[in-house]
Image: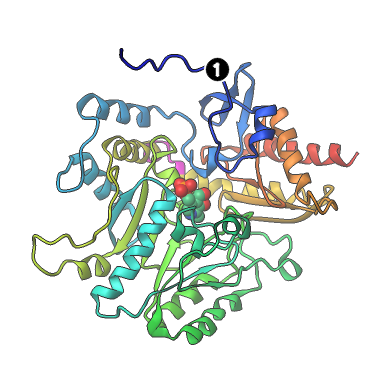
Amino acid sequence: MGYDFTTAANSLEEFWMPFTPQRLFKKAPRMVVKAEGMYYYDEEGREILDGAAGLWCVNSGHNPPKVREAIEAQLDVVDYVPMFQFGNPTAFKAASRLCSAMPKGFDHVFFSNSGSEAVDTALKIALAYHRVKGEGTRRTLIGRERGYNGVGFGGISVGGIPYNRAAFGQLLPNVDHLPHTHDLERNAFSRGMPEHGVEFADELERIVYLHDKMNVAAVIVEPVAGSTGVLPPPKGYLKRLRELCTKYGILLILDEVVTGFGRFGSISSSEYFECDPDIITMAKGITNGTVPLGATFVKKEIYDAFMNGPEFGIELMHGYTYSGHPLACAAVIGTMDTIQDNKIFENAAAMAKPLEDAVHSLKDKPFVEDIRNCGILAGIQLKDSGDPDDPGRLPRESSYELFRRGVMVRYTGPNLYLSPPLILDENHIDRLVTSIGEVLDDMAA
Ligand SMILES: Cc1ncc(COP(=O)(O)O)c(C=O)c1O
């Protein structure tokens, strides 16, 4: 008798969903079955405007033909190739295409499967780099409060979202955190980068002094803290972090899993923020959300530091079964072709100001406490519900109501946030923002 895999019932019970209130979802599932361009569709064929690019990842809009064709063409020739000691041309081609588009100096890339793995890879490379350079005392990693750097043990250790860490006890040792940069008192309703707060970067000096500079390996921050509700960096902040990292010989890692691949009109936001890091992580939009892929880009000096010792020796004891997976790398190439052919980065750059003007028009709507924006990202912070058991009721209920009205807007903590696909136009922006305003008005009525 062979196995029979055909007996599963049509049940929602077995799938333990990620970052989701299971019981609430399963009571009233928000099921999406189709997607095209700026829209999702539910089982009744109802159109839902995607204000979130899925999960900050469908940057080039849903289902672009070139991405699909690239994946299909790859599948026609080879499904899987091990990258441990063997190779496939698609992975090398994707790496070359990516590095040639990256800011100057980022000429090597390590592939993984997700943003979390791209971050853990970056942290491991930073530690190993100092060791190969003969500075093996540098073991301390510095993240930032309210940072989201994925869910691996490395990522949650340097990350600073209390709820994401609370259940898991002792995390990595040798970690410290910069303060977050959200200063509601001085910066509420800032357009783009807030004026105040460059001095938050100076806290790095205090932390480095505490641990001793020869013990500090790397600083990791998101250029714009995304998952915590879109916190753009104060003017000059990232530049200052760069200066301090250089002063103390510390590697600077920018986690660009959200800000990379076009949200700031170019492949990396580092140029926009005038900050030249040592390592950059990306994922999400890099394959337009189709086949999972994480990427950790490093400068030549870092890669070269490992290229020592006998040629038969593995220089970095790290990698994943699916590092450089042919389908994921084909998706990278298809995504880059799509972006180029459709001038998607150019559109993102052009739509940043209309998005800014539109979201800030919500300032006087009920419950609104702060509005932040930068690139094609915006966060709308709502007031505490006043119920100590459910302080985040307002963003949750407005997100649910928006979905009922055909608009997907996600929420975290007290924030609604917008990260639409970069193919958006002014009509999409208007519909997103008008819908949010109407829902807030109706909730207050
Ligand atoms: C800045 C940042 N880093 C890392 C990650 C983790 O990515 P993944 O969910 O693909 O592991 C995310 C996910 O949202 C992110 O926003």
Q: In this view, does 374 lie above or below 158?
A: above
Q: Where is residue 221 in the image (x, y as percent from the top left)?
A: 50, 65
61 or 302: nearer the viewer: 302
Q: From the image, which quarter does the N terminus lie in?
A: top left
| Amino acid type, callout 1 | Asn
Point out the residue furthest to the right here: 445
Magenta region, mostly helix, strand or loop? helix
Q: Is residue 69 magenta?
A: no
440 or 123: nearer the viewer: 123
Q: Residue at x 49, y 87 (%)?
A: 209
102 or 199: nearer the viewer: 199
Q: Is residue 23 above or below residue 168?
A: above
Q: Left or right: 146 with respect to 291?
A: right
281 or 116: nearer the viewer: 116
Colour scheme in the image? rainbow
Q: Is residue 193 above or below residue 215?
A: above
Q: Is residue 18 above or below residue 101?
A: above
Q: Where is residue 397 in the image (x, y as percent from the top left)?
A: 76, 39
The stretch of residues the image draws in magenta is 339-344
- Taking the image as drawn, is residue 269 in sight? no
Q: Where is residue 26 in the image (x, y as percent from the top left)?
A: 65, 29
Q: Which residue does the numbered mark 1 point to in the structure image?
A: 10
Q: Residue at x 54, y 47 (%)?
A: 350
Q: Mark 1: which secondary structure?
A: loop
Q: From the image, which quarter does the C terminus lie in?
A: top right
Q: Residue at x 38, y 64 (%)?
A: 123
Q: Where, by quadrant of the figure, is residue 41 drawn?
A: top right
At label 1, counting other C-alpha atoms closer than 10 Å, the crowd grade (few under 14, some 14-19, many 20 or more) is few
Point out the residue furthest to the front here: 1
Q: Left or right: 324 with respect to 353?
A: left
Q: Which residue is drawn at 53% across and 16% down?
A: 9
Q: Where, by quadrant of the figure, is residue 76 drawn?
A: top left
